[in-house]
Image (spheres, coloured by chain):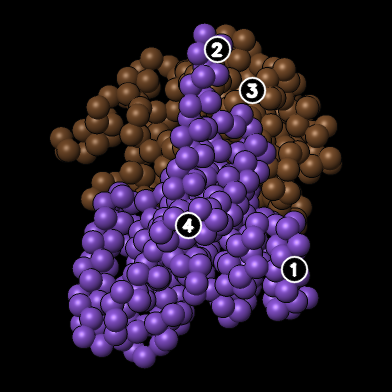
Chain colours: A purple, B brown
Amino acid sequence: MSFETLRALLQGWAGAGYLPGSLTYGFLVNALLAGLVIGPVLGGLGTLVVTKRLAFFSEAVGHAALTGVAIGILVGEPYTGPYGSLFAYCLLFALLVNFMRNRTGLTSDTLIGVFLSVSLALGASLLLILATRVNIHILENVLFGSVLTVDDRDLTILLVVALGVTALTLPLFNRLLLASFNPALATVRGVPVKAMDYLFILLVAVVTVASVKIIGAILVGALLVIPAAAARVVSTSLRGFFFLSIAFATLSAIAGILLPVELTLPVPSGGAIILASGLLFLGATLSRLALRRTNA
Amino acid sequence: MNGPAIAFEGVGLILGRTTVLEDLSLRIAAGSIHAVVGPNGGGKSSLVKSLLGQMPHRGTIRLDWRSDKPGVVAYVPQSLDFDSGLPMTVEDVLAILCQQRPAFLGPSRALVKQFDAALDRVGMADKRKRRFGALSGGERQRVLLAQALIPAPDLLILDEPMTALDEAGAQIFEELLLDLKDRGVTVLWVEHDLAQVRRLADRACGLNRHLLFDGPPAEVLAPERLLDLFATAPRRSLLKAAS
């Protein structure tokens, strides 16, 4: 089934009143499809990000996308989707951080802090140069996400990335976790620890870049962290942690895309998605506190 | 399959400017329980990490298996580096360690019985649904012992497994060790509890950067040897410096 057919089907259901009326607009159906594809992937991968204590890293890769966008536009890529530079810069950023982490003896947070600051400084400088060439406000869509700009090309990239990341992450889930728990034990169990470390940061970087259009460069890292953090607060097993994180991330994506349009709120999709996940986190924390008080 | 013999030949390890191991040669007999004792910072854990391929060392470390096909190597670390608040049950930990199927889907059918047997063996069968981070240090250590039994090992490397064990845990550990010995498993056992080493090990070696002694525990763990072993500087170094 092509995107066109799927879009027509959903628009038809919206027109018949089975779905929210705002889905009669094709652009919003595109955004919803993007959210439904990327939400579960970010939620699932987020459990590994939280478990491996890489929340700051995923945020940093998201922020690196800002510089990737600036470089892309500078070298002549379309400002609505400079994917070549985005992928290249974010992958380079992630690889460099991991490479230096193994060699400088610095703690991860210090090293990420250094790279993040330098990368942001570079991005901000390039954006100032770009301000004379393009309408800088157009970049807000890339920085904070926009439901208006997702097209079939973006959906195809999202789908390919989501399928690829899922196909790699699920069979390697245990190995990715074990590599961070105890490298010596992981080695005895046949896990190539360094390869797993590099693979994971590459997965995070690729997913981040693919999600930039819908969530925005600045906020994409948050959807890797907040739903998983909320799920961690209320779960008692790995099964609950994983599936609740997927549910929270997907729900946040759907709510963040549909609610601003349905309620005519002037909020970018990325902001709305992260606010929705923030509310879920608040709810999860309060329910845990209430449960503790009941048990006390 | 029975356990392998292990040969350390001229093994040296330098981290930064610190010599951790120097010209260490040692042979561990197949199917024996060989304890490694020594002071903190003497190089015991580094020796284990070198054996596991975790540290770039000089010299040769060789496993001599009795058949062409290598057997199963198991390792019990001192601890796991994880956030103790993680929603991860004992069963989840075993699933992460022992199976290919993603741990969030639960234990694979083929391994459920092995999980039951291993947890039962270490007295943790009734705690399989408990959160791993909420267990006591001794209970976590028992789970780490249980994971080493899946699949059944031919070579078992233990890095101070008794540190957190209570009396009941120590009893279970002792029974386990003797059972493994009966099955011909080679056990390399880093330990600080010399009384246990004296009772359970076939041989014991003392390590403080150098190999200071190696022999039957009753002979080598004599008070004079121990004084040498736990002195701030190994006596051999002092003698060398004096001459």
**Label 1 Cα neighbours within 10 Å, binned few <14 / some 14-19 / many ≥20:** some
Picture residue at 75% right of the left edge, 56% below the top: A18
Q: Is residue A20 visible?
A: yes
Residue highlighted by disc 1? A12
Label number found at residue B130: 3
Dot in front, 1 or 3 = 1
Residue highlighted by disc 2? A294
Q: Nearer the viewer, residue B72 or A234?
A: A234
Choose top left, top right, bottom left or bottom right for residue B97. top right
Choose top left, top right, bottom left or bottom right for residue B90. top right
Q: Nearer the viewer, residue A123 or B194?
A: A123
Spatial CA distance of label 1 from label 3 is 49 Å
Q: What percent of the width, then of the height, locates residue A97?
A: 35, 62
Kind of residue indicated by mark 2: Thr
Kind of residue indicated by mark 1: Gly
Residue highlighted by disc 4? A264
The answer to whether tags 4 and 3 share a subunit is no
The total number of labels drawn is: 4
Location of residue B82 with respect to B200 vertically, above or below: below
Q: Judging from the image, what secondary structure is the residue with disc 3 in?
A: loop
Spatial CA distance of label 2 from label 1 is 48 Å
First along the sequence among labels 1 and 4? 1
Kind of residue indicated by mark 4: Thr
Q: Judging from the image, what secondary structure is the residue with disc 2 in?
A: helix
